[in-house]
Structures are given as structure tokens and as C-alpha cells.
Image (spheres, coloured by chain):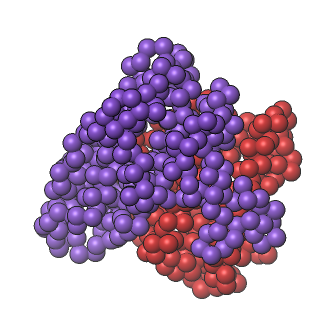
Chain colours: A red, B purple
Amino acid sequence: MKVPEKNGLENVDVLAFQKALQRREFLRYTGYAGTALAAGSLLGLASCKDGDSDGGVSFGSGDVAILNYAYALEQLEAAFYTQLIATPFSGMTTGEKSLLTDVRDHEVAHREFFKAALGTNAIRDLEVDFSSINFTSRDSVLGTAKAFEDLGVSAYNGAGRYITTPDYLLLAGKIVSVEARHAAYIRDLISNGTFADSTVIDGNGLDKSRKPREVLTIAAPYIKTRLDANTLPA
Amino acid sequence: MNFLKIFSQIEEQDPEIYGRLDTRRDAMRSFAGLGKKIALTSLPFALGSMLNKAYGQTPNSSVLDVLNYALTLEYLEYEFYATALNSSGLIPAGAATGAITTIRNHELAHVNFLKTAISAAGGTPVAKPTFDLSGGNGSGNGPFKAAFTSYELFLAVAQTLEDTGVRAYKGQAGNLIGTGDVLEAALNIHSVEARHASHIRQMRKANNFGDVKPWITGKEPGLGSANALVQASYDGEENTVQAGVNIVNINGQSISANAASESFDEPLTKAQVLAIVDPFIV
């Protein structure tokens, strides 16, 4: 599998970059130059829009693109929990192992569901990079799990509006609440009572949403396979 | 969610919006002038009134119906937790009181968010119903009347309310397709209710009140002798087939029926939910 170096200038999507620049002017004008810009502009994503021979894996278009995007995230989560259970961190209790095995099974079920539902439209298996995670360390593993679960919740919350088929929206809804249950459990494992603290829930009592490209930027360090996010909503 | 984001997203949904307003520049100037002060408290108002201005009419009634339905459920949840926190000796001090306070505050925030958004969109928020939290239809003598003296029963009802709330929001998502920010806000509330449900379930397990996990297994309420009282809130959760795909042992993976049911939460229709909460509304 070809894995081009990340963030080389030649890999930056010129069009997306131009859009980002326009967006920056807009942000300046409205006084909102924020972190979202940095996240959106330098994805290290490919410029080739068709196929994955050179420019990275394409998600397809329309609802298929959103489902493939969810499939990519579920691949990441399933691979993470599979490793977590295969090499448990030191001090994992019996109760923790039981529930974390459940979480693994849920993520594998999600991954395989998308693969089956997408059929020939499914993106290929992604190669992950967990070199930054110390699987023997409780703190490292649970910290990563928390980041992945909160990211997953925000990803589904942010993607729902782009889904046009009611059945697909319902399926995303069926999955996101399970991800939120996971997120709350992992957070409570790290520090009891943080299941829905102010780092994820705002003053209106709303959970976070993230745009697909922002999510993929956050996930990028854990995914070796190059992804072409051009067909996803910016 | 921030104001700018909403603005750009409305533009995506409706490229003509600048024509409906004045001009793009005018629109942006007015937004820029509002600045960051608007961030949280004014958001639902700004959202609703902007939709009004852009479309010259209130959103279609089914969207307002969904929001008022959600508001009714949030009123109930808030009243339940507020009453519990005012019942001295019910909830242990420390972590438990902290968690229930967090949840109560979210439910109140949801009430206020929905009321403001409905008003600003030209609708009329439903008034808070008179509740009978005993589930006795006004008699005050329903099966849950001990919920504010028994911590175990309190947590049992809390779990049921949260799990039901998750299912209720999920059942309305399809009615909000194409509404952009309204759908997204509903999703943002939906996942908060799921976080609550997860924590309440952990509290029940930690207190040996029920052998439950943070997620729903099969259609098991996990309330022992009280199961029958709440079974309608769990029926259907045992589903293991999604979009025609059998999740049990899918694609050769070892996935049990329990895990398959836990992996997907199921929706409830509005009629199902209203039947469930009917004994609580006088």
C-alpha cells in the first residue's frame, strides 16, 4: 500500500486550500478567526478526486460518502478496541475487561454493518497507526478511547444534516447514542462524574458537532491510508 | 455550535438565503456586529428569527410539533430531577448529588433552548404540564410514588426516563430531515440524553440496584420486580437486524445476540412515547 508522506506541500488540495483562504477572509471579516480554520485548511488530503490509485481513498458521493465516512471511523474504533482487548493495559479489572469487550464487539458490529450495507460502494480496509498509543498504560489507552468516543459522537452529530435518506439517518441515530453511552462510560472510568462535563456539553445543554473534514483531520494521525475527503461536505 | 457555523450551514442548505435576506454583505455585517456576545444565550432566538426573516413564514408545523413534543419530555425530566434534588435525604451527598445536579441542569438548559427556539421561529411553546411524578395520572398514588423517598426507585425511574428520551429523539430524526440546524440541535440533545442514561445505569450497577450495563441489552429493563411497569420503554430494543442485515455473527465475526442488540439503540414513535408518559401527565 502506498503511503505518501503527510503534509508535503504537493499533497495539499489546492482547491480546498483556496477555499480555506477565502474562508479565512470571511472569518476575519466577521471576527471569528478560530481554530476551525487551521483544522480545515491543511488536511494532508489528496488532490486526486477519482479512484485511490494515487490520490487516496475516495468516499464516493452523496449519502454513500457519509456512510463511508462513518465506516472509516468505525474501522478506526474497532481496530483500537480489538488491540485494547488483545493486549489489556496493566491493572484492567475483570469488570472493566467485560465492558470494554462489549465496546469492542459494538464497534466491530458497526464496522461490519457498514461494510455489508455499503456493499460494492464500501471503501477498502484502512491501515491504522497506533504507534502513539501505549497499550500497556491505562492512562494512554483510556485517554485515547475518550478522544475517539467523543470524536465519534461529534462526527455523527455533525453528519446527520447531510443525510438525505430517512433510513440512513435513523441508522446513524441508532449508532450515535451507543457511541455516547461508550463515551460516558470511558469518561467515568477516567474520572467519575465526567460523563457529560462542560468540555463536551455547552451552556444550552448541547453535545458537540464536528464537520467531516475537521473530524478526519483529528483522526489523521491514527490512519495511515490516505483519504480523499473532497467529496465530503466541508 | 457557534453563530458563524450556523450561518454557513444555512447557506449550504439554502444557497438563495442571501437573496432572501438583503445582501450577503449586509447579512454578514449584521452578524459581525452581534459579535461573540450572542454565542450561547441568544443562539436559539437568533436561529429562529433568522429563519423567519429568510423565509417570511414560520417553519412547517410538523417541525414545531416535534420541538413541542421534545419540550414536553424535557419538562418532565427537569421536574423529576428538580423534585429529587429537593427531596432531602434521597440522593447521597458527593458524587451522586453532583451527577444528578449535572443532569438536572442539562434538562433545564434543554427546556430553555427549545422554548426560545420555538418562540423565535414563530411557534408557541407548550406550557409546562401539571405532572404526577408518581405515574398515577393525577391521583398522586401511582406505582412510582416512592421515587422521592427510595433512592433505588428514583434511579430506576431516572434510567427509564433517560433511555426513553434517547428513543424518543431518535424517532423524530426522520421528521427533521432537511431542517439543517434544527436536526443538528436535536441530535446534540439526543446524545446528551444517552450520556445521562449511561451514567445512571452505572450508578444503579455500582449500588447493586440492578445488573445493568451502560448500554441496553436485549429488551431487559434491569429493574427486577418493577420490570413490568416500564417494559414498554424497552420493547423493541432486542432488535438484531439492521436494514435487512443480521448483526449476529455478521461477516464471520463473533457477535452475540446481546452484543448485536446493544450495538444499536432503537427508536420509539411519538404515540409510543406519549403512551409511556401519559400516567405522568395530569
Q: Position of residue B145 (x, y in %)?
A: 43, 27
Q: Which residue is at the front of the view, B264 or A191?
A: B264
Up/down of B266 relative to B148, above or below: below
What residue is at 61 percent from the left and 36 percent from the top?
B225
How many labels were placed on the picture?
0
Name which quarter of the figure residue B37 lies in. top left
Left or right for B264, reference B22: right
Name which quarter of the figure residue A215 lies in. bottom right
- Whether residue A93 is visible, yes or no, is yes
- Whether residue B38 is visible, yes or no, is no
Q: Which residue is at the front of the view, B52 or B213?
A: B213
Q: Position of residue B188 (x, y in %)?
A: 43, 51
Q: Quadrant of the C terminus of chain B?
A: top left
What residue is at 50 percent from the left and 66 percent from the top?
A170
What residue is at 84 percent from the left and 43 percent from the top?
A88
Q: Position of residue A196 (x, y in %)?
A: 51, 38
Left or right for B181, reference A116: left
